[in-house]
Amino acid sequence: MIWRYADFVLERDQHEGVEIFIQLVKGHKDESKERKIVDFLGKYSEAQLAFLEHLIYTKGSEVEAFNTLLAGIYLNKVDKEDNLEAKTKFKSLIMNSSSMRFDALLAKVEKCSRPLRAEKAILLGKLGDHDQALNILALQLKDGDAAENYCDSMNDKSLLFKLLRTYINGGEDFHRSAIDLLNRRGREFPASETLPILPAQWSLAAVQVGLEKLLARSVETKRSKRLEAALLKTEMDNLRYEHYLLTKDPVMLGKHSYCMACKKSFNKDLKFARYPNGVIVHYPECVKDKRICPVTGKMF
């Protein structure tokens, strides 16, 4: 019934008409039905946009086709109308989504008649080209805050170092930005990689704060590794001692000895297993799990 009168309703009011389809998919997940509706709404652009936004923002759909299509719709609006709202939504969607064809969107962004360098940087980052992304944000757009936010949002600790290197390689015009980054976030850089790339002409006074943070972190890292090594050695020594206690005494089996699991005597092959609690059983017949005593159920 809905499909029969859908065109009639949508032709008169797309916003009212799309609510019918939103209610149709509410409360349950049916990707095939959602795809059918998205395809049907292709000739009603505003309705299709509203339905896709419901799927992604309300229902949290991670279907690649839906996310890519919605991003493409935003991008078309930016290209044709220079729509600021669509530009903001496009940027937010590509930043937060992990389910879309970033390569296809990058190709469209590069052909867009509007300058979308920040958005291009995000797409490059999603495709793993962080060096080029940071080059755009830090050197071309000269937006240090955006470059740092990019590094932080990617959950990759190495990116901040790449940003520092980008500033240094960008020439003297960007050295002030590099020094500021080092002095503010010096504890987040690896000393062994950072010290060799610092320009020789920088004065010690300019980077003293950053170097102190950098070296303090290096000392803490070494101390932490030494402590970790000491703890591992102690644990290994304890395990060796436990092994000694368990194996120092011989296992004595007499002619009347029997398996404590099946109560049968041992055969001439004398294939048996002894658990740390002293339980001796046939092996492998009565051993279901080497870590669990088959008689007491205790785990070792």
Image (cartoon, rainbow, N blue to C red):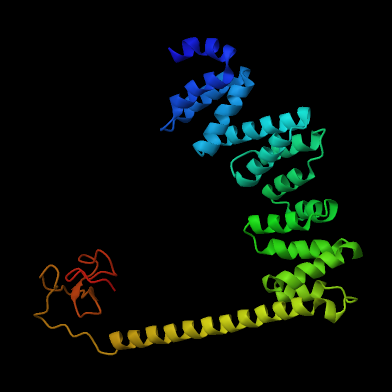
Describe residue 206's horizontal placement relative to residue 77 as left or right.
Answer: right
Q: Is residue 195 visible?
A: yes
Closer to the camera, 67 or 233?
A: 67
Closer to the camera, 101 or 67?
A: 67
**Which corner quadrant holds the N terminus?**
top left
Q: Horizontal and vertical percent for residue 296?
A: 17, 71
Q: Horizontal and vertical percent for residue 159?
A: 70, 61
**Which corner quadrant holds the C terminus?**
bottom left
Task: Relative to 77, say whether 94 is above or below.
Answer: below
Task: Relative to 150, say whether 103 is above or below.
Answer: above
Q: Is residue 61 visible?
A: no
Closer to the camera, 111 or 12?
A: 12
Q: Horizontal and vertical percent for residue 8?
A: 54, 9
Residue at left 64%, top 60%?
Answer: 156
Residue at left 72%, top 37%?
Answer: 87
Q: Horizontal and vertical percent for residue 227?
A: 53, 84
Describe residue 125's horizontal placement relative to residue 140 as left or right.
Answer: left
Task: Relative to 241, say whether 280 is above or below.
Answer: above
Which picture quadrant has residue 240? Answer: bottom left
Total number of numbered discs in the rendering: 0
Residue at left 56%, top 15%?
Answer: 10
Which picture quadrant has residue 183? Answer: bottom right
